[in-house]
Amino acid sequence: MTGPQNTEPGTTPGIRVAVVTVSYDSAAVLEPFLASIPAAASGTAVAVYVADNKPDSPARPEIERMTAEAGAHYVAMTGNLGYGHAVNAVVDTLPAGIPFVLVSNPDVVLHPGAVDALLATMDELPDAGAVGPKIVETDGSVYPSARPVPSLRNGIGHAIFGTLWPGNPWTRAYRPPLGEHPVRREAGWLSGSCFLIRREVFDALDGFDTGYFMYFEDVDLGYRLGRLGRRNVYEPNAVVLHTGAHSTTGDSAARMLEAHHDSAKRFLARKYSGPLRWPVRTALSLGLTVRSALVRRKATR
């Protein structure tokens, strides 16, 4: 594994949570994220780490300044090998004795008490391996961040009909709405944009599968966590705001959509491996390829 170029992980005894975020030219959103952590963890000792996946950016001095002013640790990666790779590399360097890791995108603002609420749920549910918060969009809607693990039926239905018939039953099952007043419940996986995981569980899983450069690394992690006998739990008493970082359009958006479909193929092909399932994997791959082409065409218009 290619790791960080430099890291200064100095820690303080009694720290319960390491907050790990990954920056990729994220200067525009990083400061509000860092500023939100003290109130979110008002009753919890935390250490904060910023992994920089684009350390050759002109924005690096600004990102280093923000990180230093927040009392966080700046970690320059050797190159952009993906979100999961950067998180894994930082967690590998953490001092022993930190029992929890909060993984978060930088385009998130944590509400007061959010980290404390996630930890309280962990303390209450010893079989919970990961706990995710309620994620609110800037328009007030609730993002479906806690979902069932994709199945062949829902995966194929969503792949084929998701673009042409958005309200189809397979897409609704794939992305179930949480509602404005959701309740704590178990999920198949939690959005990688923000979740708390036990360090021992993350280590037992060998972290994120770095074969996913972008997308589905969180689906895969949640799926493997469940197979380990631990629970993914959605905790709406912990709230974060997704501010919507680097919006993309045109070719860039199309490439990201294509990467999403490629990762979906990888996950479902691995979940449903074996020679007897080859025809189903082939049909699924074809459906995802067709959907990717349709979505890419729409995005580049």
Image (spheres, rainbow, N blue to C red):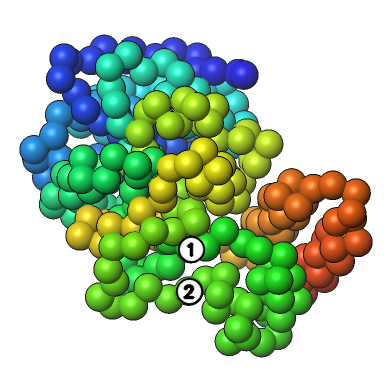
Q: Is residue 251 above or below residue 126?
A: below
Location of residue 287 in the rendering, given as x and y in whole percent from the top left corner: 81, 69
Name the image quarter holding the C terminus: bottom right
Q: What residue is disc 1 on?
A: 147
Label ID, residue 176: 2
Location of residue 143 in the rendering, given as x and y in whole percent from the top left corner: 40, 68
Task: Looking at the picture, tell me which residue is in the foreground, 100 or 224.
Answer: 224
Q: Is residue 85 above or below residue 109?
A: above
In the displayed structure image, the side of residue 283 where residue 182 appears, left or right:
left
Q: Of marks 2 and 1, which one's residue comes earlier in the chain?
A: 1
User: For the residue marked with disc 1, what is the amino acid?
Assistant: Arg
Location of residue 120 in the rendering, given as x and y in whole percent from the top left corner: 18, 45
How packed mark 1 is, by other alpha carbons closer than 10 Å (few <14, some 14-19, many 20 or more), is: many
Q: Evaluate whether residue 39 shows in this view.
A: yes
- The residue shown at (66%, 87%) is 165
Asked if the residues shown at circle 2 and circle 1 are in contact, with their CB atoms under 8 angstroms apart, the answer is yes
